[in-house]
Amino acid sequence: MIIVKTKEELKQVISRGEHIFVDNKDLSKKLKLLTYVKYNSTIIDTISNSKSNLIAGATLASLAGVPVAVAITLISTLGIVCVVAILKDYKIRLNIDGYAELEPTR
């Protein structure tokens, strides 16, 4: 398991497919949004092919049932590629203390 504390570290580790513990409550809180989105190739394609963070955020917001501003903040923070990789390749769990753990599904 790899422990990450920043979004930059998270982006690097996501590309390697490692089991991840996010030791940052603010970042974990942002990742919580993705627990509401069920994996679906159509969703992934729609978000991946978005021309802007605004469109990707609006799509994600409608799927997760959260305000558009919240989804756009997540997309802007992590980037479309990282969000898609998380949705596609990881299962997200939040522990009782509010920290996120990302487990590879492959």
Image (cartoon, rainbow, N blue to C red):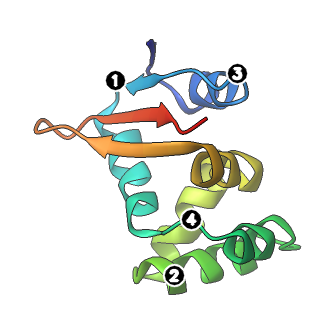
Tell me, yes or no, whether the two marked residues, 4 and 2, touch with CB atoms within 8 Å.
Answer: no
What type is the residue that disc 1 sits on? Asp
**Going by the image, does 92 lie left or right of 74?**
left
| Residue beneath the point at 51% across and 81% down | 63
The span from disc 4 to disc 2 (Cα, nearest Å) is 10 Å
SS of the residue at dot 3?
loop
CA gap, disc 2 to disc 1? 27 Å
Badge 4 vs badge 1, beta-carbon distance below 8 Å: no
Rendering coords of residue 75 (x, y %): 63, 59
Kindly identify which residue carries mark 2.
63
Is 37 on the left-hand or right-hand side of 13?
Answer: left
Give the residue at x 64% y 30%: 14
Spatial CA span between label 4 and label 1: 25 Å
Secondary structure of residue under mark 1:
loop
Of labels 4 and 1, earlier in sequence is 1
Which residue has dot 1 on it?
23
Disc ID at residue 16? 3
Q: What mark, if any, has residue 39 been given in the picture? A: 4
Up the image or down, 25 lies above or below 68; here it is above
Residue 71 spot, x, y in % from top left = 52, 69
Which of disc 1 and disc 2 is earlier in sequence?
1
Cα–Cα span, label 3 and label 1? 18 Å
Residue at the front extreme? Answer: 106
Image marks 3 and 2: residues in contact by CB distance under 8 Å = no
Q: For residue 72, what is the image quadrant?
A: bottom right
